[in-house]
Amino acid sequence: MPMPATVSVCVPLYNGEAWLDACLQSVLAQSFPDFELLLVDDGSDDHTAAICEHYCARDTRVRYLRNTERAGLPGNWNRCVALARGEFVKFLFQDDLLEPRCLELMVHAGRKHPFVSCRREFLLEPGSASLRGVFEHFSQRECLAHLAPDCDFVDPARLARLSLERLGSNFIGEPCFVMLRRSLLERFGRFNPELVQMADIEMWMRIGQHSGVLHIPEVLARFRVHGGSATRSNHAQRQFRTRWLDPLLIRHELAYSPLWLPMRRAALASTPPQYPVWRFAVEAERVRRLARDSEEAWRALQKLGQSYPRLLSARAWPLQRSFELLRERWRAVGKPTDPA
């Protein structure tokens, strides 16, 4: 039986015929040849399957699988992870591109640290010009090169502090700019399928506060922005989920998940101290008030509350006085106190 490839390049698919050929060619042109190209189709009804079958016949490193039921975007990412055999997992969306030395340089970095990112670059297609300023901000300001310019490796403690300062902001990068050792996914879990827009952000924070991240200051991938991209369609179709429920769920994890303990400790050690449980309760009450204005939003909140009951039950006022007392003590002695 052949040895598993070093890297599993995972391409989750759904109706990707427009850009898929260029995407797959960019993988097969890599200077680092020891990879498998894993194509997981979430029920496409265009020519995606025919394109994939063509590449399977052309190169034995290509595997094509089709889901029997729709998994959704994060669900299909997790399906890719479950099928991956490589030591490293490299995600690539069906409309994105890899530079020829991407795998070579990321594997080299991954031998030193299990979580690797690279510099961003966005390809704005016609119809996306109005978003140019937003994506320029992310590529130039909301990124590790700007936030941690003095080092390549951002250690776990520093990454936890940056994540707290920018909770919910993707300053590490979209999945095509990241490579992870598969063992990290086995240890800290896969993408949270309850998140619509922020599944990658949540995973980077959940893992990075334990591992840190090694940043390569070179453009090794390109993220395409167009009218049919997942990022844009998620915003348009599920605005309440993306604007309110995704950030609230991240605050829930910060307040309660055992895997987010390093960030909770960083919150308590900040100046002044932050109390994630109370902050989550405040936001949960706010989101519940907003959701009552829309039947669709209320149904979305109730559905998510089946998996996360605290979204429906958290109350800020019983905690208010205890946190006021803790803040008074902090001002008096200069030390944060854990209310737990």
Image: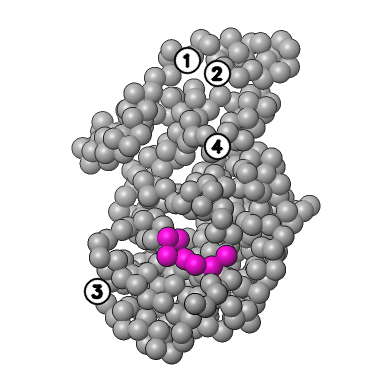
Could you give the CA–CA distance between mark 4 and mark 3, rounded to whole angstroms? 39 Å
In which quarter of the view is residue 177 placed?
Answer: bottom right
**Gap between marks 1 and 3, in whole Å?**
51 Å
What residue appears at the point 63 percent right and 40 percent down from the top-left corner?
Answer: 160
Query: Which SS class for mark 1?
Result: helix
Q: Position of residue 220 (x, y in %)?
A: 62, 71
Judge whether residue 74 can be spotted in this image.
yes
Q: Are marks 4 and 3 in contact (CB under 8 Å)?
A: no
Q: Which secondary structure lies at badge 2?
A: loop
Which comes before the other along the chain, label 3 or label 2?
3
Circle 3 sits in a helix, a strand or a loop, which is it?
Answer: loop
Residue on which disc 4 sits: 260
Q: Nearer the viewer, mark 4 or mark 1?
A: 4
Q: Disc 3 residue type?
A: Asp
Across and down, in percent, residue 290 comes to 32, 32
**Residue type at mark 1?**
Leu
Q: Residue at x 38, y 23 (%)?
A: 314
Q: Along the line of sight, which residue is nearer the eye, 186 or 326? A: 186
Magenta highlight range: 81-87
The C terminus, quarter of image: top right
Mark positioned earlier in the residue sequence (4 or 1)? 4
Q: Earlier in the sequence, mark 2 or mark 1?
A: 1
Mark 2, residue position: 340
Give the CA distance from mark 2 to mark 4: 15 Å
Seen as rendered, the residue at the extreme bottom is: 58
Q: Which mark is residue 45?
A: 3
Up the image or down, 128 lies above or below 30; here it is above
